[in-house]
C-alpha cells in the first residue's frame, strides 16, 4: 500500500520563510485598508454544516467541496467560500445589529481543484462585506477600496480592475427565452470568450435582437466607448438601468484618477445566479488569473431568512503575494553563546537586552567555540557574543 506521509495532498503546499513573509505583508496591507474604513473583523469556522451551502448549489458546485462527518453522522464541509458563512453570521448573530454592517475576514477556503495542475485547493483569502445597503454609494465604497487594495499591494505597478453589471446579461437572457441548460451553455461560452461555439449555439435564435447582442457581448471590452455600443445593441428598460448604473460607477472611478486601470468588460458573466448587480475582477500584470473578485449579491442573505442587500470582494492572498518583493531569508544580527552552564541565565538576560534594542538575536545551543563561529559564518550572522565573566564579541568572517 502506497504511503503519503512525505507529500501534501494535491492542490496544497508547504510555505517556507519568505513565502510566509510575503503572505503576511499582503494580509497586513489589506487589514490596514479595511480597518481604516471602519470594517471590523469576524471569524467563522473552518468546518461548517453542509446545509449552510446547500442552498448555494446554483453558484457553488457541491462536488468541489471537501466533505466529512461529525460524531453524530451529520454532513460537514471544509469552508469552500468566505461570503456565505458571513451571510449566515449576519442573518443570525448580527440580525439585530445596526445596518449597514462592515465586516472583514481573513482565512483559508477549500475547493477541490478537480485535477487541474497548478491550481490550489487551499486558498488564503482576505475579504470584506458591506451588508444592509443597496445604494450606489455602497457600490462606490467597495469599488474604491478594491482599487486601493490593488494599488497598495502592487506598490503602484501594473494592475487593472474589470467591471461589469450582470443586469445587462440577464436582460438579454430574459429576452432570449432559452431553456436553463442552454442559458448556462451560453454563459459559459461568453465567459470563456469562445466566439465560434457561442455563434453556433445562438444560430437557433434567428432574427432575435438579444441573440445578436449576445454574440457580440464578449467583444464589449474597453473604456467609455463600450457603453455606446451596448446601448445600440440592446436597450430595453432593464438593460438600460444596468448600463446607467455601471456608467455612473465608471465615471466616479475615472474622477478618482484611476484612468485606464479601470476597464469595462460586459462579458464578465461568471456566477450569474449569485450576483445581482455590479461584478468586478482585479488583475496584476505579472499574474495570469484574477487576484481579486467581487460584486453585489442582494439575494444571498434571503437564503438565511434575512433579506438584506450586500456587496463585497475577496483577495486571493496566495496569488497576490507573488508580486510582493522577495526578501532574503531573515538572518540574526548576533549569535549569543554562554561560556558555560554557569552563565546560561546571564546569557539569556543579555540576549533579552539586545532584543529590546531591536536586534535579531539567536541563542547558540552549541558548546564549542569554534563550532559556534563556523555556524555563524554559514548562516551569515555578523557577530558572536560569548557571555562569561566578561562579554567577548567576535566579528564573523562570512563564507
Image (tube, rainbow, N blue to C red):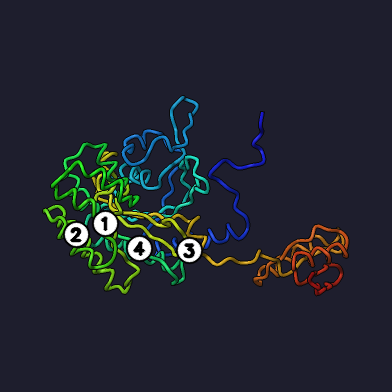
Q: CA distance from mark 4 to mark 2?
A: 19 Å
Residue named by callout 1 = 266
Report which quarter residue 89 is drawn in.
top left
Residue named by callout 3 = 286
Report which quarter residue 58 is drawn in.
top left
Q: Could you tell whether 25 is left or right of 139 in the image?
A: right
Contact check, label 4 and label 1, Cβ < 8 Å: no
Residue named by callout 4 = 161
Screen quadrant of the N terminus: top right
* Mark nearer the viewer, 4 or 3: 3
Instruction: Describe the element under mark 1 as helix, strand or loop.
Output: loop
Instruction: Describe the element under mark 4 as helix, strand or loop.
Output: strand
Screen quadrant of the C terminus: bottom right
Residue 105: % across, % down: 42, 52
- Residue sitting at 67 percent across and 70 percent down? 359
Q: Could you tell whether 6 is left or right of 244 in the image?
A: right
Q: Residues within 10 Å of mark 4 (few under 14, many from 20)?
A: many
Amino acid at each position: 500500500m502506497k504511503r503519503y506521509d512525505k507529500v501534501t495532498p494535491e492542490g496544497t503546499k508547504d510555505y517556507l520563510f519568505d513565502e510566509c513573509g510575503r503572505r503576511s505583508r499582503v494580509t497586513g496591507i489589506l487589514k490596514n485598508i479595511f480597518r481604516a474604513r471602519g470594517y471590523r473583523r469576524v471569524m467563522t469556522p473552518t468546518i461548517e454544516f453542509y446545509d449552510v451551502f446547500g442552498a448555494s448549489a446554483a453558484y457553488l458546485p457541491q462536488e468541489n467541496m471537501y466533505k466529512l462527518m461529525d460524531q453524530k453522522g451529520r454532513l460537514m464541509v471544509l469552508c469552500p467560500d468566505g461570503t456565505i458563512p458571513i451571510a449566515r453570521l449576519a442573518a443570525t448573530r448580527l440580525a439585530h445589529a445596526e445596518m449597514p454592517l462592515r465586516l472583514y475576514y481573513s482565512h483559508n477556503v477549500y475547493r477541490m481543484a478537480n485535477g487541474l495542475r497548478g491550481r490550489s485547493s487551499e486558498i488564503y483569502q482576505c475579504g470584506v462585506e458591506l451588508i444592509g445597503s443597496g445604494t450606489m454609494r455602497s457600490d462606490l465604497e467597495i469599488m474604491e477600496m478594491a482599487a486601493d487594495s490593488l494599488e497598495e499591494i502592487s506598490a503602484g505597478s501594473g494592475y487593472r480592475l474589470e467591471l461589469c453589471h450582470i443586469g445587462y446579461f440577464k436582460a438579454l437572457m430574459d429576452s432570449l427565452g432559452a431553456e436553463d441548460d442552454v442559458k448556462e451553455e451560453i454563459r459559459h461560452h461568453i465567459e470563456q470568450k469562445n466566439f465560434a461555439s457561442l455563434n453556433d449555439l445562438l444560430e437557433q435564435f434567428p432574427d432575435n435582437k438579444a441573440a445578436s447582442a449576445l454574440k457580440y457581448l464578449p467583444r464589449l471590452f474597453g473604456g467609455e466607448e463600450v457603453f455606446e455600443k451596448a446601448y445600440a445593441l440592446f436597450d430595453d428598460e432593464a438593460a438600460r438601468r444596468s448600463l446607467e448604473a455601471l456608467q455612473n460607477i465608471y465615471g466616479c472611478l475615472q474622477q478618482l484618477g484611476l484612468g485606464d486601470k479601470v476597464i469595462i468588460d460586459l462579458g464578465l458573466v461568471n456566477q450569474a445566479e449569485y450576483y445581482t448587480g455590479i461584478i468586478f475582477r482585479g488583475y496584476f500584470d505579472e499574474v495570469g488569473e484574477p487576484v481579486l473578485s467581487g460584486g453585489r449579491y442582494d439575494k444571498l442573505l434571503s437564503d438565511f431568512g434575512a433579506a438584506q442587500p450586500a456587496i463585497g470582494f475577496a483577495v486571493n492572498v496566495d496569488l497576490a503575494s507573488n508580486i510582493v518583493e522577495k526578501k532574503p531569508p531573515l538572518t540574526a544580527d548576533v549569535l549569543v553563546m554562554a561560556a558555560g552552564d554557569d552563565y546560561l541565565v546571564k546569557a539569556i538576560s543579555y540576549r533579552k537586552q539586545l532584543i529590546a534594542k531591536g536586534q535579531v538575536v539567536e541563542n547558540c545551543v552549541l558548546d564549542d567555540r569554534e563550532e559556534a563561529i563556523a555556524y555563524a559564518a554559514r548562516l551569515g550572522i555578523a557577530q558572536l557574543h560569548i557571555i562569561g565573566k566578561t562579554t567577548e564579541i567576535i566579528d564573523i568572517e562570512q563564507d
